[in-house]
Amino acid sequence: MNDIPGGSEAAIRTSTKRGVDMKLEVVVIPVSDVDLAKRFYDSLGWRLDADFAGDGFRVMQFTPPGSPCSIIFGQGVTPGMYLVVSDIEAARAEFAGRSVEVSEVYHYAGNNRVSGPEPTRRSYASWASFSDPDGNGWLFQEVTARLPGRVDADNATFASSTDLAAALRRAAEAHGEHEKRTGGQRDENWPDWYADYMVAEQAGKALPL
């Protein structure tokens, strides 16, 4: 039975062109009392990932058990959704190519918003934003290495071949620096080194040198 007006062929269409992987990983929700909300979500057994404050703001992040998506709430935060990407400039270019009004890539120096990605491309530090026709806000955030505790298992998982290829490129670049430090000799155990690097990067653990 087809419950979708217009029939399944007309209503369900997906693009065959593969673009940048974009993972919905955070939903920012409004709360009236930050401490009350913290006690409530803590009582649910959800993992507390972050609780930090600054000048006029406070941010908390909780993750339900086994969930790839978290919630953020606090003081001075704007409701919206976060899309995590491994290459923020490529993600922005893709949306701009689809005629979406997307902001320039930016980062923060102190409390000041600065044009361009974070100079060292540090994870969690580069952003871009856009809104849908109803004003729902979306943020791109570039993440290539997770903070400690953000991944439950010690096994790396990749949602697509695109994600895996990006992780391999980062491991290859890091391994090149590793070989320089060891005198430029070929590392015959490079598969083990790659594996250790990719698992550690995703879990937010210390990277091999």
Image: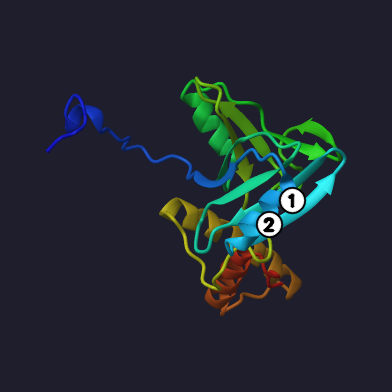
Please indicate, yes or no, whether residue 158 appears anywhere in the rendered image: yes
Q: Position of residue 43 (x, y in %)?
A: 62, 62
Q: Relative to 6, is 56 above or below?
A: below
Percent x, y of residue 14: 30, 35
Q: Quadrant of residue 39?
A: bottom right
Kind of residue at badge 2: Arg
Please, what is the three-letter code of the amino acid marked with disc 1? Asp
Residue furthest out toward the bottom = 189
Splitting the image into 4 quarters, where does residue 47 fall? Answer: bottom right
Question: Could you say which is closer to the camera, residue 146 or residue 7?
Answer: 7
Q: Is residue 145 visible?
A: no
User: Does residue 124 appear to the left or right of 189 in the view shown?
Assistant: right
- Give the answer, above or below, for where 76 lies relative to 63: above
Residue depicted at 66% across the width and 27% down the height: 104
CA gap, disc 2 and disc 1: 6 Å
SS of the residue under disc 1? helix
For label 1, the residue is 35
Compared across the picture, whether 146 is left or right of 76 comes to left
Residue at 87 percent across and 40 percent down: it is 55
Quarter of the image with the C terminus is bottom right
**157 sits to left or right of 43:** left
Q: How many residues crowd around disc 1 within 10 Å: few (fewer than 14), some, or many (20 or more)? A: few
Picture disc at residue 39: 2
